[in-house]
Amino acid sequence: MSRFWSPMVAGLTPYVPGEQPKTADLVKLNTNEHPYGPSPRAVEAMRAELGDSLKLYPDPESTRVKEAAARACDVCSEQVFVGNGSDEVLAHAFFALFQHERPLLFPDITYSFYPVYCRLYGIEHLTIPLSDAFQVRVDDYARPNGGIVIANPNAPTGRVLPLSEIERLLQRNTDSVVLVDEAYIDFGGDSAAALVGRYPNLLVVRTLSKSYALAGLRVGFALGDEALIEGLERVKNSFNSYPLDRVAIAGATAALDDHEWFERSRAAVIEQREALTGALEARGFEVLPSKANFVFARHPAQDAWTIAAGLRAERVIVRHFKLPRIEQFLRISVGTEEQHARLFAALDSVLAASVVGVS
Ligand code: PMP
């Protein structure tokens, strides 16, 4: 707290990202990074950019990335907005599209950055409870609102809504923007990108952090009607002209165009997710059906926080949220076969040693 702060800064509740540990030799399964490296073509394109060209500003429009995203998602480049990670894209979308009289709606359990943006921009919001099985019930959103945000698949549950349900939501909700955050869609869901062009109030937000294994590059994008994109551009150009640097533009373009790498690597993640689910179930865990690159699991007899702390002591880190309804769950990112073997060994010793039951 400082007397030099603008008054609203004291009232902010910043988002706390998962730990990025400084120590080596940890099995890091806590922030849903891709277990395999990015496309070698993307790495090569970034290497080629490292040189004299860096003395020049990048293209403020990131045109090449927009064109590559449009090719990858089968929309036109005028329907694409790009930003410095999808967190920045979301921030601009909240600012540009959700500051209205009526409250923004999103599930009670979802990506915890959404309420943070609401606080930052003074957006009133209402949380809509997921079902007992942690599913979004589209009918519950049929109420006056200034916008709706659905993460699909949802985080941290991993549960997916079929595209027909997203479309039903759009058909009923025509007076405000429906933002579908598809950070994890490439691991098994059907993208609402196919509906862009049919619904002028649909904004689909994507990222290269997960399925393209480029979390460190910070590239995200949004797909939507040209008028929505123009609104986002107005906000972006009032904030930062160059959200993507030259290296990011080169790497993102090449990654989006490397379909072969993309298909191979996402299939490998899906295969590992199913193996992880089976192995956790074999150890007594209840695992929610996931279409993401993580699973959300609880043990019927062992306290989640105790398990997470025990795993940490064994140099395996997973994510635990001390939040109502989900505090007995662990979110475990899909890793490599080797990382899973270390997770299972650690888990077996933690479960055998732990005597603390769930009350
Ligand atoms: N949306 C969801 C649902 C997420 O889980 C994340 C990752 N924390 C993001 C958006 C943001 O990802 P990034 O900024 O790396 O694109």
Image (cartoon, rainbow, N blue to C red):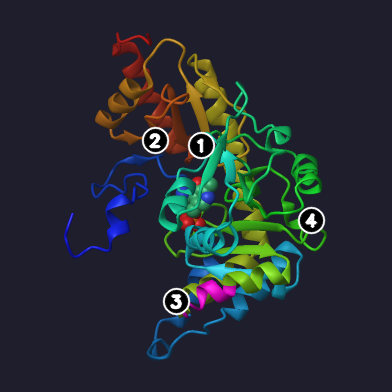
Residue 195, labelled with which disc? Answer: 4
Up-down relation of residue 263 to residue 135 (above or below): below
Q: Amino acid at mark 4?
A: Leu
Other-residue count near label 4 (Cα within 10 Å), few / some / many at <14 / 14–19 / ≥20: some
Residue 240, labelled with which disc? Answer: 3
Precedes in sequence: disc 4 or disc 1: 1
Other-residue count near label 3 (Cα within 10 Å), few / some / many at <14 / 14–19 / ≥20: few
Precedes in sequence: disc 3 or disc 2: 3
Residue carrying label 1: 156
Residues at marks 1 and 2 touching, judged by CB atoms closer than 8 Å: yes
Q: Amino acid at mark 3?
A: Asn
In the rendered image, is residue 35 in sight? Answer: no
Alpha carbon distance from label 1 to label 2: 9 Å
Q: Amino acid at mark 1?
A: Pro
Question: What's the residue at 62%, 25% (across, down)?
Answer: 131
Q: Is residue 66 left or right of residue 294?
A: right
Which element type, helix, strand or loop, lies under badge 4? helix
Residue 319, labelled with which disc? Answer: 2
Up-down relation of residue 190 to residue 339 (above or below): below
Could you say where residue 72 lies in the image, as x and y percent from the top left?
Answer: 70, 64
